[in-house]
Amino acid sequence: MKIIVKNRRNNNEKYELTLEEFKAKFRNELTTAINSYTHQQEQKDLLKPPFMRLNTDYTHDFYQDLRWNFNNHAPTNYYIEKQI
């Protein structure tokens, strides 16, 4: 899988990375985004009855929709334009 990442402020700055390269280059932003996503999901789970709270590891869910989750939870000037 290739990930195309662009800078919001400088449209000329663009990277085409593999998932491993993306994880290495954006390690801090990715960690923050996963933590933000996890917190949001835990808050939603508090509204559910206990027997419906099945998932406690949200990292896998985060990567299921990596583009949307990274773009909306990561505090960075970069965004995922597309995944190939």
Image: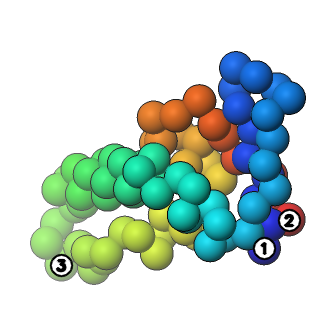
Camera-near label (1 vs 3) is 1
Helix, strand or loop under label 2: loop
For the C terminus, which image quadrant? bottom right
Left or right, 25 with reference to 38: right
- Residue type, numbered disc 3: Phe
Residue 35 position by quadrant: bottom left
Q: Earlier in the sequence, mark 1 or mark 3?
A: 1
Helix, strand or loop under label 3: helix
Query: 10 Å neighbourhood of mark 3: few (<14), some, or many (≥20)?
Result: few
Q: Which residue is mark 3?
A: 51
CA gap between label 1 and label 3 equals 36 Å
- Residue type, numbered disc 2: Ile
Residue 1, given in percent of the width and then of the height, sits at 78, 73
Q: Which residue is mark 1?
A: 1
CA gap between label 3 and label 2 equals 38 Å
Residue 55, given in percent of the width and then of the height, sits at 30, 76
Residue 5, given in percent of the width and then of the height, sits at 74, 46
Residue 79 position by quadrant: top right
- Residue type, numbered disc 1: Met
State yes or no: discs 1 and 2 in contact (Cβ < 8 Å): yes
